[in-house]
Image (cartoon, rainbow, N blue to C red):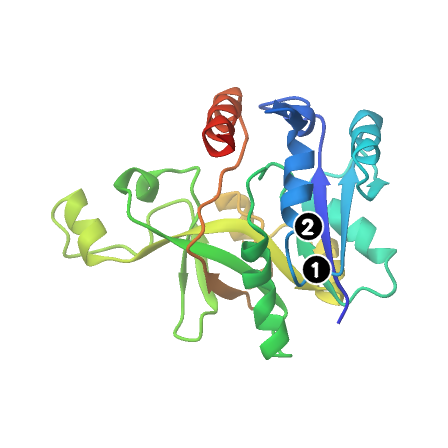
Amino acid sequence: MNIVGIIPARYASSRLVGKALAIIGTKPMIQHTYENALKSKLLTDLIVAVDDKRVYEVVRSFGGKVIMTDPSFESGSDRIAFVAKNLPNADIIVNIQGDEPFIAGKMIDQAIEPFIFDKKVKVSTLVKRIYDIKEIYSESTPKVVFDLNNNALYFSRSPIPFVRDAKTKMDISEKGEFYKHIGLYVYKKDVLLKFSKMKPSDLEKLEKLEQLRLLENGIPIKIVVTEFETFSVDTPEDLNKAIHYYKKISK
């Protein structure tokens, strides 16, 4: 089974322009992401999909594999689908977010494992249990509910499930189990290519969550619960936190 990881890295990020090249410690963020992804034991190849020559040259400078894509692509999924379409030997495609500088190789392997044990799996993704009440109510933290077979039922920016008998916010976290979605996806290649051609769905447009397009089109998403925390860098504040965090773990 040929499993290819693709890291979409967009230069013109709306909230933090050029964040792929932001320096954390002594390395650009994209290099941290790439080198940590290389620690996966199940990936057979790893490629960065970029939209800017500056990022392209930086990835080449540290020895990473890189492919230039059209800057007009609206999403990371479109970018990785473009690369995947030109990989004839790829069976499985892993979408690894470029703004996750501290991603663990084991997280990637956890997301891939369902494909090894069940040939019927089409898409998988990671989730983590939420204990912080602020995260439960945060609109920037997508939540997910899933069935007894670990297939996603729904994703939302609202707290789901709704805990009807809860009288306080503390009751909600004690009586209900909440899981946040981690944006690491694994696809069968043909499913990814099919997905990239689908029009945005109604629920997707309401929630602003791309993964709902899969569910609305009847494509199941296998959920894998991880114990690993993630650290996405989306804003200047996030970058400052990442820099300080890196200093701590580098001592």
The residue that label 1 is drawn on is: 43
The residue lying at 66 percent from left, 51 percent from top is 95
The residue that label 2 is drawn on is: 38
The residue furthest front is 251
Location of residue 64 (image quadrant): top right
Location of residue 191 (image quadrant): bottom right
In the rendering, at what x and y percent does residue 176 appear? 24, 57
Residue 190 disc label: none
The residue lying at 83 percent from left, 37 percent from top is 70
Question: Would residue 96 be seen by someone viewing this image from the given angle?
Answer: no
Mark 2, secondary structure of its residue: loop
Along the viewing direction, whichever of 139 and 110 lies nearer the viewer = 110
Along the viewing direction, whichever of 170 and 48 lies nearer the viewer = 48
Question: Is 183 situated above or below 61?
Answer: below
Along the viewing direction, whichever of 130 and 31 lies nearer the viewer = 31
Amino acid type, label 1 = Leu
Left or right: 251, with 100 as reference point: left
In the rendering, at what x and y percent does residue 44 appear? 75, 61
Mark 2 or mark 1, which is nearer the start of the sequence? 2
Left or right: 232, with 161 as reference point: right
Amino acid type, label 2 = Leu
Along the viewing direction, whichever of 58 and 234 lies nearer the viewer = 58
Left or right: 244, with 108 as reference point: left
Question: Do the CB atoms of the residues marked 1 and 2 lie less than 8 Å apart?
Answer: yes
In the rendering, at what x and y percent does residue 149 appear? 44, 75
Where, quadrant-wise, is the N terminus in this rendering?
bottom right
Left or right: 20, with 82 as reference point: left
Question: Is 226 situated above or below 141?
Answer: below
Question: Would residue 53 be seen by someone viewing this image from the given angle?
Answer: yes
In the rendering, at what x and y percent does residue 115 appear? 62, 72
Mark 1, secondary structure of its residue: loop
